[in-house]
Amino acid sequence: MQMSPPNDPVPLIAAKALWMRRRAFQMVHAAQLGHPGGDFSAIDVLATLYFGVLRYDPARPDWADRDRFVMSKGHATGALYTALCAAGYFPEDWLQTYMQPRSMLNGHPNRNYLPGVETNTGPLGHGFPVAVGIAIAATLSGSDHRTFVLTGDGEQQEGSNWEAAMVAGHRRLNRLTLIIDRNRLQQGAGTEETSGLDPLDQKYAAFGWDVAFIDGHDHAALHRALSAPPGDRPRCLIANTVKGKGVSFMENQASWHHGVPNADQFAQAMKELV
Ligand SMILES: Cc1ncc(C[n+]2csc(CCOP(=O)(O)OP(=O)(O)O)c2C)c(N)n1
Ligand SMILES: [Mg+2]
């Protein structure tokens, strides 16, 4: 077996991603609510950000120079809450309250309730424009923090994204990175059958962005791309992903967008997620 170099973050990222998938699915199973397909396509990106890329201190969620991560695809709270919990923002027993009455862990994230949430999301097409505003604010205040934002691919159909992309390109917001979770499914159907996005790379390039495709489940490739130093313009990483990644009967199935497991499906998933 090949040994990892001591400073290789990939084993830690992989271990966190596995824990996040298991824990997120337990939450969805207990609540009988959630969006597990989109959780699983995004978890490797979030694990890489929180355990290999972002500068943050969970004891100081308001630290002015923290890197910002905006979860624009706000329905994927199984991914976001397990990442924030693993990163130390709140204790694990809070996860048991997922979507219960008076919980701080709502179906969509609320920054007024939960430390580590940068902005409320859920209505698609809002988080990316807010992230652009955060990146502009950093240039005005002179902070060197970076801003990362994850959108869904179906989410890219919202017009607000294109205003945000245009202003980010115009202002050359080079400390801003947009990751698009390109699982090719939205709610109930494929993106290209619904309102086609391709060629997404050419669209972002035309708006003044550096664009690259990446395997959104390859921790080493994600780590390299996300931790690369800023260039001279905003960066768009189109992360090719699989909705439901990691559980055989969920992968690439539109029905698992907000499908929830019965007892047998939950047991089967736990056998596979090892
Ligand atoms: C403005 C708005 N319209 C509709 C919805 C309902 N909705 C929630 S998730 C979703 C599909 C999103 O697809 P995508 O962005 O591809 O997410 P992923 O595949 O990563 O789950 C829809 C239509 C919403 N949250 N906001
Ligand atoms: Mg999608």
Image (cartoon, rainbow, N blue to C red):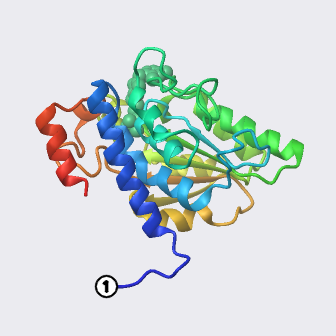
Is the residue indicated by label 1 positioned so its CB lies within 8 Å of ligand 1? Answer: no
At 41% across and 27% down in the image, what residue appears? 98
Of residues 149 and 53, the one drawn nearer to the viewer in this rendering: 53
Is residue 64 something one can see in this rendering? Answer: yes
Q: Is residue 244 above or below residue 35?
A: below
In the picture provided, is 36 more to the left or to the right than 70?
A: left
Q: Quadrant of the N terminus?
A: bottom left
Of residues 116 and 163, the one drawn nearer to the viewer in this rendering: 116
- Image coordinates of residue 270 in percent, x first then y, are 21, 48
Identify the residue under disc 1.
1
What crowding class fits label 1: few (fewer than 14 Cα within 10 Å), some (14-19), or many (20 or more)? Answer: few
In the picture provided, is 52 more to the left or to the right than 192?
A: right
At 35% across and 33% down in the image, what residue appears? 186
Three-letter amino acid code of the residue under disc 1: Met
Say what secondary structure mark 1 lies in.
loop
- Image coordinates of residue 11 in percent, x first then y, are 43, 69
Is residue 195 something one can see in this rendering? Answer: no
- Image coordinates of residue 56 in percent, x first then y, are 67, 51
At 64% across and 23% down in the image, what residue appears? 112
Q: Is residue 79 above or below residue 172?
A: above
